[in-house]
Image: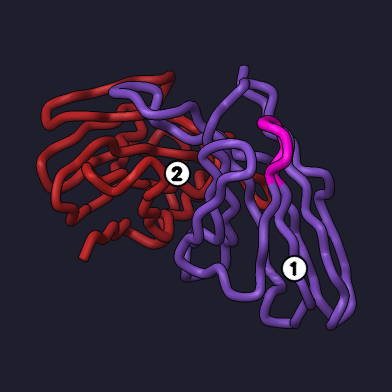
Amino acid sequence: DVKVTQSSRYLVKRTGEKVFLECVQDMDHENMFWYRQDPGLGLRLIYFSYDVKMKEKGDIPEGYSVSREKKERFSLILESASTNQTSMYLCASRTGQGVTDTEAFFGQGTRLTVV
Amino acid sequence: EDQVTQSPEALRLQEGESSSLNCSYTVSGLRGLFWYRQDPGKGPEFLFTLYSAGEEKEKERLKATLTKKESFLHITAPKPEDSATYLCAVQALGSGTYKYIFGTGTRLKVLA
């Protein structure tokens, strides 16, 4: 089974702090994603990576950056946390381009509260 | 604009009362449609992928179907453990490998 592991289930951070959310997958997937999930808004893509050191902005990248130094690990960085970044953060991974196997597999989520 | 709409937003069923959840989509061309189950405070768990109209997939009490405009998740004789939020997502042709468009989900509650 695919396993996507996020480093923390719950985090509480102060406004202005730099926050790191870590994600590791064990299936040698090329693609990794960071989403945030808010009530009534669904899942929104923050950043995507299709290979080591490669990244693309999603729909809501402002206030975030990412790092992918190794294939299995994808980090989300909140440069200066703000209260409007309080949310559930979800990491996902999937294999590369192909006709089949296009589904993404998610981690357990990190509930981040910024106070 | 590519869009995914799920209905109803919330659904309460008695145990054993079968029903269907709807996912309507508007995309330029469908590469795949995905169903996920999400329990409170957890990440979505993959259920099904559907690729073309007429396709059906089943898993235990769940059956997913696909037409050119919508997908249904049929739940037969549900049990309380089927209570969860069910998410639908689509991937459009030509959208690049990353573009999944998610609906906001249907919250299902099955009462014993």
Residue drawn at point x = 23 percent, y = 23 percent: B56
Q: Is residue A71 highlighted in magenta?
A: yes
Quarter holding the N terminus of chain A is top right
Q: CA distance from mark 2 to mark 1?
A: 43 Å
Chain displayed in red: B
Residue A76 position (above or below residue A18): above
Q: Nearer the viewer, residue B37 or B76?
A: B37
Task: Judge the density around disc 1: few (<14), some (14-19), many (≥20) Cα neighbours within 10 Å.
Answer: some
* Residue ID for mark 1: A78
Residue B107 position (above or below residue A86): above
Chain displayed in purple: A
Mark 2: secondary structure? strand
Residue drawn at point x = 49 percent, y = 35 percent: A104
Q: Tell me if I can see residue A102 in this picture.
A: yes
* Residue ID for mark 2: B14
Q: Nearer the viewer, mark 2 or mark 1?
A: 1
Residue drawn at point x = 49 percent, y = 32 percent: B46
Q: Which segment did they paint magenta?
A: A68-74
